[in-house]
Amino acid sequence: MASASDGWKYFFPYLSFVFAILYFTHSHFAAKLFIGNETVRIKKTSDLPLRFRSDGTFKILQVADMHFGSGIITSCRDVLDSEFEYCSDLNTTRFLRRLVEAENPDFIAFTGDNIFGSSTTDAAESMFKAFGPAMESGLPWAAVLGNHDQESTMNREELMSLISLMDYSVSQVNPWTDGLSNPTQDGIASNIDGFGNYHLRVYGAPGSTLANSSIMNLYFLDSGDRAVYQGKQTYGWINESQLNWLRNVSQEFRAQKQDPLPFSDAFPPPAPPALAFFHIPIPEIWQLFYREIVGEFQERVACSSVNSGVLKTFASMVDVKAVFMGHDHKNDFCGNLDGIWFCYGGGFGYHAYGKAGWPRRARIILAELQKGQSSWMGVEKIRTWKRLDDEKLSRIHEQILWDSRLSG
């Protein structure tokens, strides 16, 4: 009969053999999986969740209407001959890289018409080129679609699926249900119009009493492209199914803040403020032509003829403090409707129409936390300004959009 010592004699050689096989497999095959002739590549992700910095700030770069075509062969529109020796989509790419370097944002929000579909024969290739600087930066970013993105070789669902799979993208095709009573398909809400409706939570500063709490929310909505209403062509609009989802999400966030915080220097704050991002402006924006604004109102508001009640919904939700949109490239103003600021990003892309001599531009949004006795607290203030694509990346039109100390 074999003794126990005989068993141990074979155990260690066997264990060494197993480890050798595992090492060989990992070294030679783990990084070389194939589908057809293509190497499988895992999507790169940023540090998540989104959160405020240790200095109590969270900065967003809004990029509206890149209108990217096919790269160097796609010419610019509405630029002066004296501005550039040669101008193409690469000027748009250069502008985005300059902004990321100069502003060092925490997050990039692309608000539609990312590509100009009719100017490319390969939508996927154009998307990768358009979002290239964002992916190179390693920053988390998200996008919604405009009315031109789907005019090439991919439909809106396919485009949002692709965007959601790109490096460092936190975009979603449509919202995860998060326990809400919506019919689902693989955990994604299926009874909601459009593609690219989702929300993102921004958490408190690291080491603060609210580090594990969502203290600001970002809502992204698909405003559609074109539609027929009562026999007439019009731009798309945000539908009731989307607004219903948004109301539910907002209510859920507000409910989370009803219980007192279990920290000595924390006080029950108001519901976390929210920012909304979509492409096509709502019909009420034209009213701002007769009101005080910050920025320039230079073209008519190209909105839908359908008023689906977006403003009324936002006002009833209470948490939305500012909305950021695109579509009308020569408008770059912010104006207040029912206590909510609506801000254009201003035309960003060089293949998009613009105004010769009027620099391309982008919007910066900065949220700042309140300082407690021993820790950063909830959001105290939200500010914005614009950057121009000139020699100095000029900073203009800085303003406060929301201040918790002044709100009711």
Image: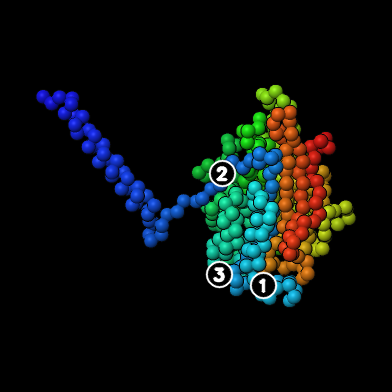
Amino acid type at circle 1 is: Cys
Count up the numbered dots: 3
Which residue is tagged 2?
A: 47
- x 50%, y 44%: residue: 186
Nearer to us: label 3 or label 2: 2
Give residue 132's quadrant in the image: bottom right
Helix, strand, or loop for circle 2?
A: loop
Q: Which colour assignment does the render follow? A: rainbow
Q: Is residue 251 visible?
A: no
Q: Which residue is mark 1?
A: 87
In percent of the image, x 68 and y 24: which residue is there? 263
**Could you give the CA–CA distance between mark 3 and mark 2, rounded to whole angstroms?**
34 Å
Q: Residues within 10 Å of mark 1 (few under 14, many from 20)?
A: some
Mark 2: amino acid: Asp
Please state, as top left, top right, bottom left or bottom right, where the N terminus lies in the image.
top left
Element at label 3: loop
Q: Position of residue 164 (x, y in %)?
A: 55, 51
| Residue 325 position by quadrant | bottom right
**In the image as oriented, which residue stretches furthest toward the left?**
1
Residue 118 spot, x, y in % from top left = 62, 69
Q: Secondary structure at mark 1?
A: loop
